[in-house]
Image: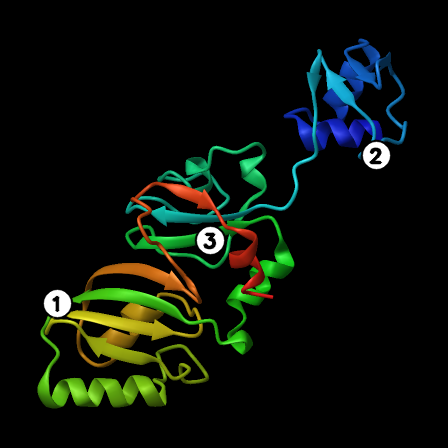
Amino acid sequence: MRLDRFLSETTDLTRSLAKKALHRGEVTVNGEVIKQPALQVGEQDRVLWEDEPLMLVGLRYIMLNKPAGVECTARHGLYPRAIDLIDLPKADRLQTVGRLDVDTTGMVLLTDDGQWSHRVTSPRKRCGKVYRVTLAEPLEGESLEHAVACFAEGLLLDGEEKPTQPAGLAMLTPVDAELTLYEGKYHQVKRMFGAIGNRVEALHRSAIGPLNLGELAPGEWRELTDVEVAAFH
């Protein structure tokens, strides 16, 4: 890797600012001041900028318990971003694996590994996502039986050409549901319950595939273990 690119990958410097830092003699490689941006460096080289050692950031895999009022977007907007809660170098390189609405809480995965993200989100992988849903109206008796059957068969939502994939619906109380989806259409949970004449009052994602939030408090995050990452390969 070129030295100027290495600097931009491991610091907040842009490529142009990295070149200026090099020209000012602020960078050493293996103890020698280097001013050539095109110098090739590798893992065996010790690179320091203003006497601080630099290391490349590897691929990261993060679980976040997203609170309400936080957006799953890379753009700055009206609300804080999920990546703003992650205290890691180059956190802006992380992308959310799928999205949750700003008012929806619960598990969000973030990574800078695009292939891994695709494996988690691809409907073909049948990676179940579990939601706890609070409904405006009780769902019980015949209406519950009808909803379970509709969700299991798939619903054709407004604006869609294909019905939803089969989903599992179970009621914890007359107004508290647990819904398992294997895809992620736009506002899907809210639209599915709207299609059967109900309304979602609150929505929380508790699990993705084999992962669950455990004791992770709202706003907290942790890195996935190697075993957890490998579960999606």
Q: Quadrant of residue 11?
A: top right
The residue mark sitting in front, 2 or 1, is 2
Give the amino acid type for the residue marked by disc 3 in the picture. Leu
Residue 60, how many percent across, how many down?
A: 58, 45
The residue mark sitting in front, 3 or 2, is 2
Q: Looking at this view, is 30 or 151 the one in front?
A: 30
CA separation in Å, label 3 and label 2: 30 Å
Q: Looking at this view, is 205 or 159 the one in front?
A: 205
Q: Which residue does the image show at 50% across and 56% down from the upper left?
A: 97
Viewport quadrant of the C terminus: bottom right
- Vertical relation: 13 (above or below) 141: above
CA separation in Å, label 3 and label 1: 28 Å
Drawn side of residue 40 relative to residue 159, left or right: right
Classify mark 2: residues with Cα within 10 Å, few (<14), some (14-19) or many (20+).
Answer: few
Lower position in the chain sequence, tag 3 or tag 2: 2
Q: Which residue does the image show at 24% across and 75% down from the upper left?
A: 193
Give the amino acid type for the residue marked by disc 2 in the picture. Gly
Residue at mark 2: 42
Residue 82, how many percent across, how many down?
A: 42, 43
Tell me if label 2 and label 1 are in contact, CB under 8 Å.
Answer: no
Residue at mark 3: 109
Instruction: Identify the element where label 3 is drawn.
Output: strand
Circle on res. 136: 1
Q: Which residue does the image show at 10% across and 72% down from the upper left?
A: 137
